[in-house]
Amino acid sequence: MSGDDLQDGVRNFAMVAGNGNRQLAEAIAQHVGISLMSCDVSKFTNSETRVKLNESVRGRPVTIICSPRPGHINDDLMEVLVLADTLRRSRFV
C-alpha cells in the first residue's frame, strides 16, 4: 500500500464522539489528521437519548470515541449504543 492510498483511506475515515470526553476525541482526531464528524447528541423531553447525524456515513468506516465519565456511566453507555445503532442504520439507508 502506497502513502497516497493510505492518505485516501484516512480522508474517507469518519470519527464521531459522544458527550463523554469530547476533548479526548478532538485530540485523537487532530492526531490522525481528520475532523470529528458533525452530530448532535441530546436528550428528548422524556430523558431518552437522541442522536442526529449531520453528515453522511454511507460507505465510510466510522469509529466512535467515548470515554465514560464518573457518575454518568449509564448515560454515556447509552450514548455509545444509540450512536452505534444510528450509524449502523444510516450506512445502509
Image (spheres, rainbow, N blue to C red):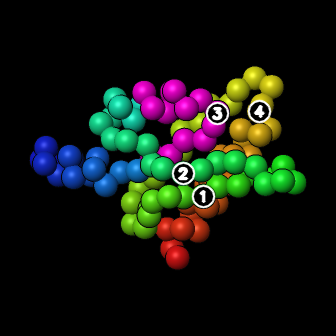
Of tags 1 and 3, the one toward the viewer is 1
* Gap in angstroms between the C-alphas marked 1 and 2: 6 Å
Residue 47 sits inside the magenta stretch:
no
> For the image shown, how many numbered marks are present on the structure?
4
Instruction: From the viewer's side, name the closer residue of 60 and 54.
Output: 54
Residue at numbered disc 4: 73
Q: Of callouts 4 and 2, which one flags the residue occurring earlier in the amino acid sequence?
A: 2
Q: Residue at x 45, y 49 (%)?
A: 37
**Badge 1, how many Cα within 10 Å: few under 14, some, many 20+?**
few
* Gap in angstroms between the C-alphas marked 3 and 2: 14 Å
Amino acid type, residue under disc 2 in the picture = Cys
Residue at numbered disc 3: 20
Q: Is residue 14 above or below residue 60?
A: above
- What range is drawn magenta here? 15-27
Q: Residue at x 51, y 74 (%)?
A: 92
Q: Of callouts 3 and 2, which one flags the residue occurring earlier in the amino acid sequence?
A: 3
The kind of secondary structure element at disc 2 is strand
Is 46 left or right of 61, judged from the image as shown? Answer: right
Amino acid type, residue under disc 3 in the picture = Gly
* Gap in angstroms between the C-alphas marked 4 and 2: 20 Å
**Badge 4, how many Cα within 10 Å: few under 14, some, many 20+?**
few
Q: Of callouts 4 and 1, which one flags the residue occurring earlier in the amino acid sequence?
A: 1
Please provide percent x and percent y for residue 39.
54, 51
Mark number, residue 52: 1
The extreme front residue here reads 45
Mark number, residue 39: 2
* Gap in angstroms between the C-alphas marked 3 and 4: 9 Å
Label pair 4/2, CB-CB below 8 angstroms: no
**Badge 3, how many Cα within 10 Å: few under 14, some, many 20+?**
many
* Gap in angstroms between the C-alphas marked 4 and 1: 21 Å
Q: Is residue 56 above or below residue 12?
A: below
Amino acid type, residue under disc 4 in the picture = Ile
